[in-house]
Image: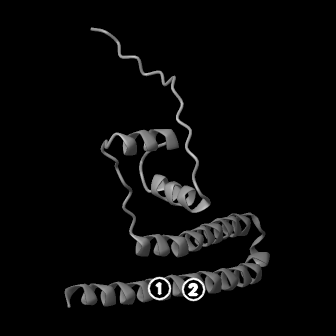
Amino acid sequence: MEEKDTNKTKWLHVRLSEDEYNKLQKQFKDTTCRKMSEYIRKKLFDKHLVLYYRNRSLDDLMAEVIPLRKSLFAISNNFNQAVRKLNSMRPFERAESWLQAYEQMSKTVENNVAEIKTYIQNFAEKWLQSSKQDHL
């Protein structure tokens, strides 16, 4: 079996307007091609291009939920540190400082959970509305 030469030795220079270039870049970014040259070759020779399909609603949801998740993670770390500190304190010091830290963390967690619930409810309502419109 002969090995096929895959080295690309020929150049093709093309001039594009700013709009044409931006359009090409956008189309390229919507594919699984890793390099622009790979994308161009596939377009030129009518080869199969795999396009990404992204659910914009899910992207919006993730953009909101990820920072909330990070915030809740930080709160849980602080809570664990407070528990460790509580266990290392003398008995009479524990009650007051523990109660203050617990109340503050509890309010923060409640606010974050309420924000998550509100966002999910809004997302669900929008999704249901678009779902109903699709069926009309």
Q: Is residue 109 left or right of residue 50?
A: right
Whether residue 12 is visible, yes or no, is: yes
Residue occupying image coordinates x 78% and y 69%: 90
Q: Is residue 107 left or right of residue 4?
A: right
Q: Earlier in the sequence, mark 2 or mark 1?
A: 2
Q: Quadrant of the N terminus?
A: top left
The part of the image, by quadrant, that contains residue 136 is: bottom left
Q: Position of residue 106 (x, y in %)?
A: 62, 83
Q: Position of residue 5 (x, y in %)?
A: 40, 17
> Where 107 sits versus 61, above or below?
below
Whether residue 35 is visible, yes or no, is: no
Q: At label 2, which amino acid type do we have?
A: Glu
Of 63 and 76, nearer the camera is 63
Q: Position of residue 122 (x, y in %)?
A: 44, 89
Which residue lies most toward the top here? 1
> Where 126 sits versus 61, above or below?
below
- Circle 1: element type: helix
For the residues carrying marks 2 and 1, which lies nearer the camera in this image?
A: 1
The mark found on residue 62 in the picture is none
- Circle 2: element type: helix
Q: At label 1, which amino acid type do we have?
A: Lys
Q: Residues within 10 Å of mark 1 (few under 14, many from 20)?
A: few
Residue that numbered label 2 is attached to: 110
Q: Position of residue 48 (x, y in %)?
A: 30, 44
Real-space CA distance between mark 2 and mark 1, rounded to the nearest whole angstrom: 10 Å
The mark found on residue 117 in the picture is 1
Q: Residues within 10 Å of mark 2 (few under 14, many from 20)?
A: few
